[in-house]
Amino acid sequence: MPNNTHQQTEFPPLEHPPYHVGIIMDGNGRWAKAHGKSRFEGHKAGTDNLRQILESSVEFGVKMLTIYAFSTENWKRPPFEVMGLMRILEEVIDRELKALHKNGVQLRHIGRLERLKPGIRKKVLHAIEMTKNNNKLILNVAFNYGGRQEIVDAVQRVIEDKIAPQDITEELLSSYMYTANCPDPDLIIRTSGEFRTSNFLIWQAAYAEYYITPTYWPDFNKAEYYQALQSFGQRDRRYGGRNE
Ligand code: FPP
């Protein structure tokens, strides 16, 4: 029996896959501790796990994925861990860019690039430029990202652009966010069981559905991803209104 027939029975096509999924990839540290490994190894395992989630996104019909890789608050971690996460970002670009490009992934960045080392910044900008016409999957990497910071940056630019108060609408503010031109996330997945937003897409997630699982990020696999997407398909999204 051909392989894909087997896959199709295991993961039947979803009727209502979310267009845009955000993921808070939490629990790398706890996963590492549980396996007697270093936190750095935990982050590496978390990074390796991204591959199956990217591939599954394409297979399951998700068009846009936003991953929370480094928050503005993560600078408070010990310098060794911060350096490790920077190194991982650089290595991922060096190692995976060609394959991502070949597979039609469009890379974007949300957050502030300024505080990153010039070498990493250059690689991120190169990756964005190289993949800008791809359309199989849009991957927004939130790196040095903070939702409040994003709102502050947006307001500063609105003022710089001398927008009149009466012209300030939700649509206008959305267009000043890092995610301008991205539809709001439909589903936000948070691994490792914490019930909080941690400053992730706080403007955009006003009507997002949440899926929270105790699974640590490195163990969050294709089957559970499917389950999360399936549970989204069963939600009754009312956006504050009523579905009679
Ligand atoms: C949270 O786990 C995870 C992070 C702070 C970093 C997530 C980053 C990756 C998975 C890799 C980055 C990927 C790219 C593309 C650069 P935690 O350390 O807070 O875990 P804990 O709460 O169990 O300690």
Image (spheres, grey):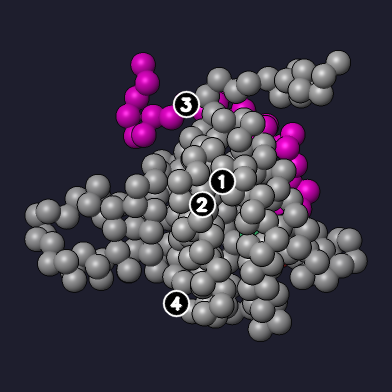
- Element assignment for label 1: strand
Q: CA distance from mark 3 to mark 4?
A: 41 Å
Label 1 environment density (alpha carbons within 10 Å; few <14, some 14–19, many ≥20)? many
Of label 3 and label 4, which has the lower sequence position? 4
The answer to whether 216 is drawn above or below residue 158 in the figure is: above
- Residue 111 image position (x, y, % from top left): 45, 65
- Under mark 4, the amino acid is Glu
Instruction: Determine contact: label 1, label 2, CB under 8 Å.
Output: yes
User: Between residues 154 and 196, which one lies in front from this camera angle?
Assistant: 154
Magenta range is 217-244
Q: Is residue 162 left or right of residue 7?
A: left
- Under mark 3, the amino acid is Asp
Q: CA distance from mark 1 to mark 4?
A: 24 Å
Would you name the residue on which mark 4 appears? Answer: 114
- Under mark 1, the amino acid is Val
Q: Is residue 184 left or right of residue 164?
A: right
| Disc marking residue 131 | 2
Instruction: Determine contact: label 1, label 3, CB under 8 Å.
Output: no
| Disc marking residue 105 | 1
